[in-house]
Image: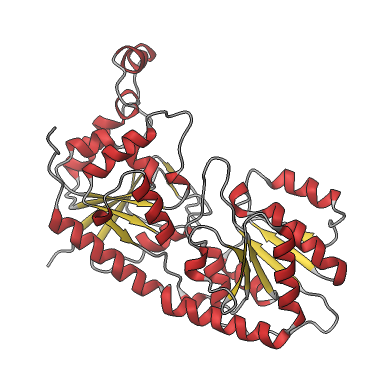
């Protein structure tokens, strides 16, 4: 029996921080998939054979301007993508499309109206926030919800946000991001005899990751433990700003920015660390986390977590059992959590073991993939929703 075919649509395949998407598309068992993208990145980091790249359309500037400003058609038309997608899907015998990120689903609405097969859209966090440059974004999002049988979210908190902008609760399915636990084994750690505690945060360097709060809390810890160090692994638009802040705080000799790391390098970093920080926060633009993958990976190795009561984090970290949670943007509370950890090394080890157990119980990769494929099967059974008549 032939496997159903899923088209996995991701505008960029893949940015360095999109490992969770690669883990999904490369691990399907009961379905075949090919990737549709506009741009291929990090091919060595994310090898995948069956990729359809949608090239930029060749059309005259006059026709582009006519479609955009006179006809006022959606971007999918005036950018020339609609015809390319139609030709692609007529050539590929596809049973279902999985669109990664809600804003991409909004962009593809005209195609989803035309295509006669079902589509599911997955939300990851930033794609639920309003967009000032797209005043009709939420209206288009509500229209998108009528075109798909199922909507996937990474956390219960994201489910509530999606419901709040108009998605029927009956269409929402919880799709946890699975962690390949064999790649992140439990590590036995001991407290440093000389107080040289090593803290780590791995993430994209953007506002919602709470990096400024993390640095302020670390500075407080270092007053009591002057040999403490902090590694912030990742890249992003805040890199220069964070470097300046570190220099202003007199922390240049204790804070390291190694950039994006390979899985092997990450494991080595986790193994020599004692605490993991992830004080995420809601931004002014309402950008929020799902459940940070790096946090789950660190927990799997037995790293205790100091994080915030934000987004989906409390769904993965039980305060006082598998980590400590504090309010957003509260550097004093975060510093107090760090000091509580280091003051009781035996309790710290217990927290780390429980963190690993909780990830094994709730976020195992194989289980997450089986659930994802069950949603694919459900969407195919349901089929494309019928148009809602006025």
Quadrant the C terminus occupies: top left
Q: How many labels were placed on the picture?
A: 0
* Residue found at x 36% / y 43%: 165
Q: Where is 121 relative to 182, above or below? A: above
- In this view, the residue farthest toward the bottom is 346
174 lies above or below 97: below
When asked about the image quadrant of residue 30, the answer is bottom left
Quick one: 261 or 370, which is closer to the camera?
370
Left/right of residue 175 with respect to residue 185 in the rendered view: left
Q: Is residue 215 visible?
A: yes
Residue 195 or residue 181, whichever sits in front: 195
Q: Position of residue 184 (x, y in %)?
A: 53, 76
Residue 177 locus on image (x, y percent): 42, 64
Question: Can you give x and y, in whole percent of width and height, for residue 96 in the image?
Answer: 21, 52
Q: Could you tell me which residue is drawn at 69 percent across and 47 percent down? A: 239
Q: Quadrant of residue 1?
A: bottom left
Q: Position of residue 219 (x, y in %)?
A: 81, 61
Q: Is residue 170 left or right of residue 69?
A: left
The structure residue drawn at horizontal position 85% and vertical position 53%, both measured from the top left corner, is 249
Q: Is residue 277 above or below residue 115?
A: below
Q: Which quadrant holds residue 381?
A: bottom left
By what rule are the colours in the image chosen?
secondary structure
Q: In the displayed structure, would residue 179 be above or below residue 242? A: below
Tell me which residue sits at (14%, 64%) in the image. 2
Please indicate, yes or no, whether residue 185 appears anywhere in the rendered image: no
């Amino acid at each position: 029996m032939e496997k159903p075919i899923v088209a996995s649509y991701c505008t960029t395949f893949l940015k360095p921080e999109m490992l969770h998407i690669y883990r999904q598309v490369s691990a399907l068992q009961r379905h075949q998939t090919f990737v549709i993208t506009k741009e291929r990145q990090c091919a060595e980091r994310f090898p995948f054979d069956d990729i359809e790249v949608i090239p930029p359309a060749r059309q005259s500037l006059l026709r582009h301007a006519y479609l955009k400003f006179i006809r006022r058609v959606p971007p999918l038309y005036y950018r020339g993508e609609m015809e390319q997608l139609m030709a692609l899907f007529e050539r590929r015998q596809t049973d279902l499309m999985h669109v990664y990120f809600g804003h991409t689903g909004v962009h593809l609405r005209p195609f989803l109206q035309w295509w006669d097969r079902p589509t599911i859209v997955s939300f990851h966090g930033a794609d639920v926030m309003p967009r000032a440059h797209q005043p009709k974004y939420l209206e288009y999002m509500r229209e998108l919800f009528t075109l798909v049988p199922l909507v996937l979210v990474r956390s219960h908190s994201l489910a509530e946000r999606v419901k709040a902008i108009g998605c029927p609760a009956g269409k929402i399915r919880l799709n946890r991001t699975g962690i390949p636990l064999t790649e992140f084994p439990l590590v036995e750690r001991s407290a440093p005899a000389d107080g040289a505690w090593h803290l780590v945060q791995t993430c994209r360097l953007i506002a919602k990751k709470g990096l400024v709060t993390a640095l302020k809390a670390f500075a407080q810890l270092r007053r009591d433990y002057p040999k403490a160090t902090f590694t912030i692994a990742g890249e992003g638009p805040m890199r220069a700003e964070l470097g300046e802040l570190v220099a202003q705080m007199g922390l240049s000799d204790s804070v390291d920015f190694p950039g994006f790391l390979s899985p092997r390098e990450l494991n080595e970093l986790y193994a020599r660390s004692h605490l993991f920080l992830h004080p995420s926060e809601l931004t002014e633009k309402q950008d929020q986390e799902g459940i940070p993958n790096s946090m789950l990976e660190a927990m799997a190795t037995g790293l205790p977590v100091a994080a915030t009561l934000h987004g989906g984090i409390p769904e993965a970290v039980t305060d006082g059992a598998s980590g400590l949670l504090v309010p957003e943007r509260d550097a004093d509370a975060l510093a107090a959590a760090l000091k509580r950890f280091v003051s009781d090394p035996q309790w710290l080890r217990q927290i780390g073991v429980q963190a690993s157990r909780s990830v094994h119980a709730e976020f195992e990769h194989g289980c997450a993939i089986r659930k994802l494929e069950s949603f694919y099967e459900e969407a195919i059974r349901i089929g494309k929703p019928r148009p809602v008549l006025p």
